Image (cartoon, rainbow, N blue to C red):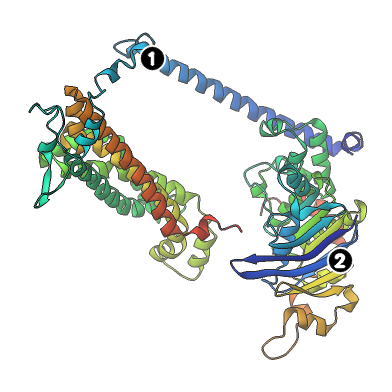
Amino acid sequence: MVSSAVSHASPVVHAVHTQWSRMIATRRLYTGLGLLLLAYAFVASVQFADESNAGHFFDRLPHLFDFTSWLMPREWSDVWRALFDLPSLHDTGTEEYNFDVGRVYVWGSVYIPEYFELMFVTLNVALVATLISFFVAVPLSLLAAQNLSPSRPLCFMARRVLEFLRAFPTIVIAGLFAAVLSIGPVAAIIAVSLHAIGAIGKQFYEVAENIDMKAHEGVGAVGANWFERMRFAVLPQVLPNYLSYGLLRFEINVRSSTILGAVGAGGIGEELKLSISRGFGAKTLAMMLLLFLTVVAVDQFSAWLRRRLIGDEIIHQHV
Amino acid sequence: MNFELHQVTRRFHGKTAVDAVSLTIPHGQMVGVIGRSGAGKSTLLRMINRLVDPSEGVIRFGDTEVSRLKGTALRRWQSDCAMIFQQFNLVPRLDVLTNVLLGRLNRRSTTSSLLGLFTREERIQAIAALERLGIEQTALQAAGTLSGGQQQRVAIARALMQEPKMLLADEPIASLDPLNAKIVMDSLRDINEREGITVITNLHTLDTARNYCERIVGMAQGRVVFDGPPDALTAEVVAAIYGTGRDGAGIDESMTSTALPASAAQAAGATPSARESSMATA
């Protein structure tokens, strides 16, 4: 049947075929050119980065694992001891092995190990910043979505605000606020929130622009105003995706608040940076382990929360 | 090659959607399945294509036990048993011709498919399928920009490209206006007659089922409550399938009817392509 289709096909069929082939050829040409450009840009950027590096990357590559030599603790149990503030077998009063000094006593002899307390400070910054940014980004994203925005100027302004917030690295904003509010978690919260509003706001309005407008039209047709349309036609559709992005942002915020700690905002980041710069192997490993476990825990928690809030029935909608 | 359903059952979370359905359909029959929404018509069709797996029972096509197929054999069956949907289920952002070419996916190597490399024969065959349905002029447009009637015809062209042994249609005309509904039903009948393949279609308009199908299956609450020729579909039978209104009055068929007056229908049937291709995007 296939071969006979060609010989029996009408002139119209061949004409359409020619047109279509031309369209596809043009499209392929542009795709090919785009890919070439991308490949060139990639190679050029890698070279540029390597050249502007102090030591050339490929020359230094064999020394990559030099770094690990000082990390090796004298005794592996020291990692656990550092993590839970238990006295080290090597404790000679130096700062490298004074694990039990940092205990935070809460009641009698019950204490929270120092690194857990610091991790909690960092997590707290991330959590508060995520909540703030989520609740600010939701309304902003509805104003910034072209299909939903009540007016064009408002849409324009909302987008510029989001871009502005996104433009500055968290560390720069933190530095600015630290100058005014003094160094500490509050400056970190503001810095992380502002950047996160810009970042998730953009993701949010892109989600909102991809929605099916049928429900919106239906609710609009009963005479609902903008707020009612958003509340009843848009939010039910976008919230599951907003939530996914919000939870992803929480994970990112944990990392950025750790980094902010390293520049003075407190929390585990500050301690980690000190420990690395002084070459404390056991302490550094303990904190890296704690950070890793925290990221895993946050990931598990957000997966659980998402399933609870969105419900299995939406994930497995098509039975 | 008979097609056979034996005691086919499907349950969703304890609710029985299809309840022990047994049917034997000789090759080349045109079958209409009617019933209220929720009667299990869609689930039945989806089980035949294996989009949904039966909870119990056996589906057999000739010597093949369809209900037990897995992997490659299952996908081969899905390609042999083309499906048309109420909402067309095209890829809106791809052009019409590529949508039609997707019907060949099961017959080709994955690599060449993913690169979008279809042979000249396949492309010509796809345009010819579009021409057969009178919409060859839309080949270069994005499928999402077509009107509902045009989109459903693209879906039929895609089904034709599968060179199927059976055609399933799940409420194919429920979203269409009467004229387009007629064009779509006529093409289904044409495929049934010219390709000689079995066509099973869910319908919600009784008169369409009467006009086009040689055999009608009525379903209620997951069970087959009627199976026979259109003539046997009396008012009592209709009441058994659909239930009666609260006031005890039966169903007025003219209320759901989408039939066209004879003259308009003739004009539509004669030149579907001329009418539709001038009707740009809707």
- Residue B259 drawn at (x, y percent): 81, 70
**SS class of the residue under badge 2?**
helix
Where's residue A154, x and y in %?
Answer: 35, 51
* C-alpha gap between disc 1 and disc 2: 70 Å
Residue shown at the point (87%, 37%) measured from the top left = A2
- Callout 2: 10 Å neighbours few (<14), some, many (20+)? some
Q: Are marks 1 and 2 on the same chain?
A: no
Mark number, residue A48: 1
Q: Quarter of the image for the C terminus of chain A: give it.
A: bottom right
- Front-lying residue, A220 or A113: A113
> Which of the numbered marks, if any, corresponds to residue A121?
none
Q: Is residue B276 visible?
A: no
Mark 1, residues whose alpha carbon is within 10 Å: few (<14), some, or many (≥20)?
Answer: few
Q: Chain of mark 1?
A: A
Quadrant in which the N terminus of chain A appears? top right
Residue B271, visible in the rendered structure: yes
Front residue of this view, candidates B246 and A265: A265
Give the percent coordinates (x, y) of residue B156: 78, 51
- Horizontal side of residue A138 vs B28, given as left or right: left
Q: Residue A285 appears in which quarter of the rendering?
A: top left
The extreme top residue here reads A59
Vertical order, A45 against B86 (above or below)? above
> Image point 73% across, 34% down: which residue?
A20
The spot of residue A210 in percent (x, y) is 50, 49
Q: What amino acid type is highlighted by mark number 1?
A: Phe
| Residue bearing mark 2 | B212
Residue that lies at the very extreme toward the front in this rendered image: A89
